[in-house]
Image: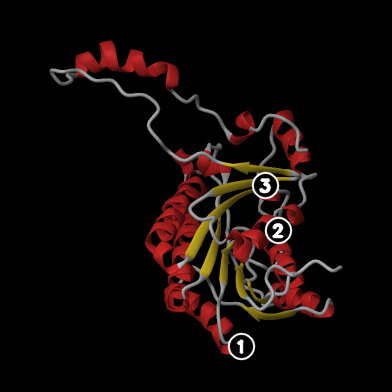
Amino acid sequence: MAQAKMLEGKVVVVTGAGGGIGRDFAHAMAEHGAKVVVNDLGTSVAGEGKDVGPAQRVVDEIKAKGGTAVASTDSVSDWESANRIISCALDVYGRIDGVVNNAGILRDRFFFKMSVEEWKAVIDVHLNGSFFVSRAAVNYFRDQGSGAYVHMTSTSGLIGNFGQANYAAAKLGIIGLSKSIALDLAKYHVRSNCIAPFAWSRMIGTIPADSDEQKARLEKLKVMETAKIAPMAVYLLSDAAKDVTGQIFGVRANELFLFSQNRPLRSVHRAGGWTPQAIADQAIPAMRAHFYPLDRSQDVFSWDPI
C-alpha cells in the first residue's frame, strides 16, 4: 500500500530554493503532494547579481517528475517584494499553508574587519527576510486558523564560529523571531519551528579552509547530503506536527537533534545586595563552574557524521 503524501493539498513557499538545501526542500515538498512556490533571486553566495534561471530550473525538474510548482524571483529582503512572493502562491494556487525561510547569503569576515555593508547585507536577507516573508503570510494563516513556518537557523549562532558575526547574529535572531511567532499565533493554530542544518552546500563551500584542520572538517561536511535535511522540513509543515511549535531541531546526515533553549543555570543570593567587589569575590566563583567555554560548532559536534 502506497504511503499517504503528508502535504497533499497544501501550498508551500520555499525561499532560496534554486539550489542546495532549498532545492531539496522544494522537491521533497512536491513529492509529498504540495504545490510549491520556488523562490530564488538567483544571486551569488555573496548576494550579488540576479538570475531567473535557478528557480525556473527547479520548477521544470519538479514538473518533469509530475509535481506542481511555480517560480518566483522576488527578493526576501524588501517588504514589497516579499509580499509578492506570498501573493504568487495566492494568485496561482488560491491559498498558502506553509513557509520555509531558507534564503541566505554569506559575507564572512573577522569582526574587526567586517564592514557595515557586510553586516547589513546578511542581516537583510536572513533576519529581515525571514520577518518580511513570515509577516506577509501571517494574516492568511490567522484567518484560516492554520499554517506553519520553518526557519533555517545555524549552529554558528547557537554555538559559535569564527568570522561570522553577521551570520551568527542573524541566525540567533531568527530563533527569537520563531519563538515569538509561535507564542503570538498559538491560539490561531499556527506553528513556527527552526532547523539548524549540517550539510555540504554552495554556501558552506565558500568557507575558507586555510589550515589542515579546516580542510579536514570541510571534507567531513561533504558527506552530509543536503537531501537529508528535507524530511524534517516536510514533517514540520505537515498536520502530523500539529502540536510541535517553538522548537529548534538539528539535522546532520542520519542524526536528528533537539536543541536546548536558554534557561538559568545557577543563581546566587546575598541578603544585603551586591557590590562589584562582592560579585568578584563570591558570585563569579560560585557561577564559574557553569561558564561556557569559547566553543565553536565543530568543538561541540566533534564526532564524524553518522
Cα gap from disc 1 to disc 2, whole angstroms: 24 Å
Is the residue 295 above or below the residue 305 in the image?
Answer: above
* Secondary structure of residue under mark 3: strand
Q: Earlier in the sequence, mark 3 or mark 1?
A: 1
Is the residue 206 above or below the residue 282 in the image?
Answer: below
For badge 1, the amino acid type reads: Val
Which residue was labeled with disc 3?
251
Foreground residue among 42 and 81? 81
Residue at image x 42%, y 69%? Answer: 188
Is the residue 93 above or below the residue 257 in the image?
Answer: below
Tell me, yes or no, if residue 49 can be seen here.
Answer: no
Q: Earlier in the sequence, mark 1 or mark 2?
A: 1
Cα gap from disc 3 to disc 2, whole angstroms: 9 Å
Which residue was labeled with disc 2?
230
Which residue was labeled with disc 1?
92
Q: Give the image location of residue 303, x and y in percent.
A: 72, 30
For badge 3, the amino acid type reads: Val
Cα gap from disc 3 to disc 1, whole angstroms: 32 Å
* Secondary structure of residue under mark 1: helix
User: In the image as oriented, which residue stretches furthest toward the right?
Assistant: 1
Q: Residues within 10 Å of mark 1 (few under 14, many from 20)?
A: few
Residues at circles 1 and 2 in contact by the CB criterion of under 8 Å: no
